[in-house]
Amino acid sequence: MADATDPPPYFQAHVFVCCNRRQEGHARGSCAARGSEKLRDYMKARAKELGLKGVRINQAGCLDRCEFGPALVIYPEGIWYRPESPADVDEILAAHLQEGGRVPRLMLTEKDVPPPKR
């Protein structure tokens, strides 16, 4: 919850890309095994090329949605995406981070919930 005395945000948008890697054959899979590291690297380079100011793209450990990965989340909105290609990343950068919109076809929603852990 924000407070009136909070300092202004350091970044306008903070993107966390899950780069969790589980052992091969794990029931939940992993974002890294589905190519998230390459997509993160591409996203970082592309954001720089586009001159996006106030945007930070970081690697994250497990974001607990690897079944749907590669997964990323953008704050402060808390919007989750599942990009599968550099073209998907380009669409997210343009629509969400440049234009302030969304890419509904790539969004993970409240319906995308991992199965209970055993």
Image: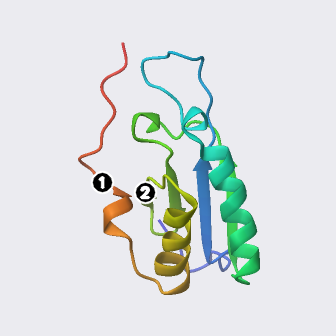
Q: Residue furthest top?
A: 118
- Can you give x and y, in whole percent of width and height, for residue 97 in the image? 54, 78
Q: Can residue 51 be seen? A: yes
Q: Residue at x 48, y 26 (%)?
A: 29
Give the residue displayed 29% in from the left and 44% down from the top.
112
Query: Picture coordinates of residue 9 (x, y %)?
Result: 65, 75
Res 10 seen here: no
Amino acid on which the number 1 mark rests in the picture: Thr
Residue for badge 1: 109
* Front residue of 96 and 1: 96
Amino acid at the residue labelled 2: Trp
Residue visible at 62% across and 29% down? 21
Tag 1 near tag 2, CB within 8 Å: yes
Visual colour scheme: rainbow
Measured Cα–Cα span from mark 1 to mark 2: 7 Å
Q: Is residue 101 left or right of residue 70?
A: left
- Label 2: how many Cα within 10 Å (few below 14, some 14–19, many 20+): many
The secondary element bearing badge 2 is classed as strand
Most extreme residue toward the bottom is 99
Residue for badge 2? 80
| 75 versus 110 height, above or below | below
- Quarter of the image that includes the C terminus: top left
- Which is nearer the eye, 6 or 76? 76
Mark 1: which secondary structure? loop
Is residue 2 shown above or below 17? below
